């Protein structure tokens, strides 16, 4: 796929038309804990810090890893001062009352509030101020996510208008229970305006119980609102669905992230090999099924129709594959000219992968 298509900005250079004052000024990426293969997390964090995380910080983006065990999980990637090769990449420890695995929605709320208010664990976090002051855009992902750094910056500038004063809720759009929501695995982008909307609603839990997990909704709260076609509205605990419900109350719906009249998307819940092969899990197919989309199925792309030329993210990417994808994107002509057997020889072996697989002979992924 990478050898047959040109991906704008896939090298270390910024995409065409972008203004280089420090493109990442006021942008924060927060990497939370993936539920898949926890023992491999330190290796994944290390790979991120040495590939796309490094590219983003070079562009002025603040990159943060959330870890309840920073010495164990971030030790391979970070020095005790929170830096790697003189590039600021930070590891932030949530308060003891929050469990990264069990309290995902509350961790997300704590993160958004901390970034906006610059308090608690975030008080010493040096967010680039940006022209509007403080955080302008915020990307939430996990340590299995791969971000194509220049394309991420290009997406904010060209698809979101680089305007943090307007609402933005962008990512891999899926369907569940009659609601549109974005996959946290593929990465979710929120503008400052959207973050402020969320905080305002969280501050009034009695008026907005739908913004909290069912077991955290106050007993004094008014009755949950009903949304036609969404029977579970306000009664979900999965953080991605909860976020979508809360944003909907604030009048914010997912941004369109597909290429117009196409199955090509900018955000992806799988790695490149499975996307091109079209080997999707049943849960993923169900999120595109007619019953989840008002009677009309969302078409799944495969082969070269899966991915927009300016693809922003992949998911289920282990450490070795993270480095392999980064190498291909950073040296596209080299891989175009390389014999197929050499390309496959350099790709990670099955034991180094989790939900991915090695390319086959003459695989269209290239």
Image: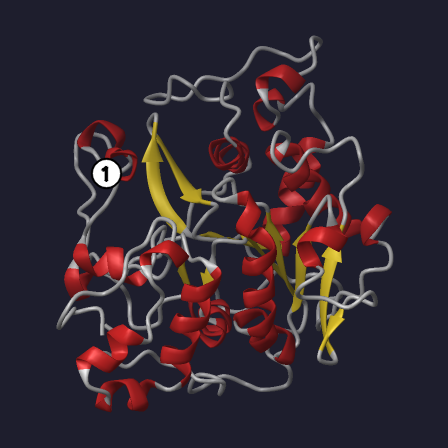
For residue 75, what is the image quadrant?
A: bottom right
- Where in the figure is residue 326, as x and y percent of width and height? 43, 75
Would residue 121 be found to the left or right of residue 70 on screen?
A: right
Which quadrant holds the N terminus? bottom left
Q: Residue at x 74, y 44 (%)?
A: 113
Is 348 positioned to the left or the right of 13 in the image? left
Query: On the rendered image, what quadrant is the C terminus found in?
Result: bottom left
Query: What's the residue at 49%, 44% (across, down)?
Result: 37
Instruction: Place residue 197 in its image quadrant.
Output: top right
Q: In the displayed structure, would residue 147 be above or below residue 50?
A: above
Q: Position of residue 119 (x, y in %)?
A: 85, 49
Does the rendering let one see residue 2? no
Classify residue 47 as left or right of residue 197: left
Q: Position of residue 310 (x, y in %)?
A: 35, 72
Q: Which residue sits at x=26%, y=40%?
A: 281
Q: Badge 1, how many Cα within 10 Å: few under 14, some, many 20+?
A: some
């Amino acid at each position: 796929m990478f050898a047959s298509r040109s991906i704008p900005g896939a090298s270390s250079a910024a995409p065409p038309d972008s203004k280089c004052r420090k493109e990442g000024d006021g942008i924060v990426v927060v990497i939370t804990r993936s539920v898949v293969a926890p023992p491999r997390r330190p290796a994944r964090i290390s790979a991120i810090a040495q590939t796309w995380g490094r590219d983003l910080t070079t562009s002025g983006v603040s990159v943060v890893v959330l870890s309840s065990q920073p010495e164990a999980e971030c030790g391979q990637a970070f020095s005790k001062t929170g830096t790697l090769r003189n590039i600021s990449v930070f590891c932030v420890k949530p308060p003891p009352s929050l469990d990264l695995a069990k309290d995902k929605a509350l961790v997300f709320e704590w993160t958004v509030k901390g970034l906006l208010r610059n308090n608690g664990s975030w008080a010493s976090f040096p967010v680039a101020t940006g022209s509007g002051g403080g955080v302008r855009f915020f990307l939430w992902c996990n340590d299995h996510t791969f971000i194509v750094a220049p394309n991420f910056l290009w997406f904010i500038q060209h698809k979101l208008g680089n305007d943090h004063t307007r609402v933005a809720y962008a990512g891999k759009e899926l369907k569940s229970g009659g609601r549109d929501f974005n996959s946290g695995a593929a990465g979710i982008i929120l503008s400052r305006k959207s973050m402020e909307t969320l905080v305002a609603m969280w501050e009034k839990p009695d008026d907005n119980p739908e913004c909290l997990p069912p077991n955290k909704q106050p007993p004094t709260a008014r009755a949950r609102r009903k949304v036609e076609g969404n029977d579970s509205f306000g009664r979900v605990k999965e953080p991605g669905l909860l976020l979508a419900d809360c944003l909907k109350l604030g009048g914010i719906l997912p941004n369109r992230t597909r290429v117009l009249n196409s199955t090509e998307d900018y955000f992806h819940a799988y790695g490149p090999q499975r996307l091109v092969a079209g080997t999707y899990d049943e849960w993923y197919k169900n999120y595109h099924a007619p019953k989840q989309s008002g009677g009309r199925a969302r078409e799944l792309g495969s082969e070269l129709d899966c991915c927009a030329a300016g693809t922003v993210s992949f998911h289920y990417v282990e450490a070795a594959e993270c480095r392999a994808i980064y190498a291909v994107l950073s040296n596209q002509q080299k891989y175009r000219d390389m014999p197929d057997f050499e390309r496959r020889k350099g790709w990670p072996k099955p034991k180094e992968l989790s939900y991915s697989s090695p390319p086959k002979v003459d695989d269209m992924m290239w």
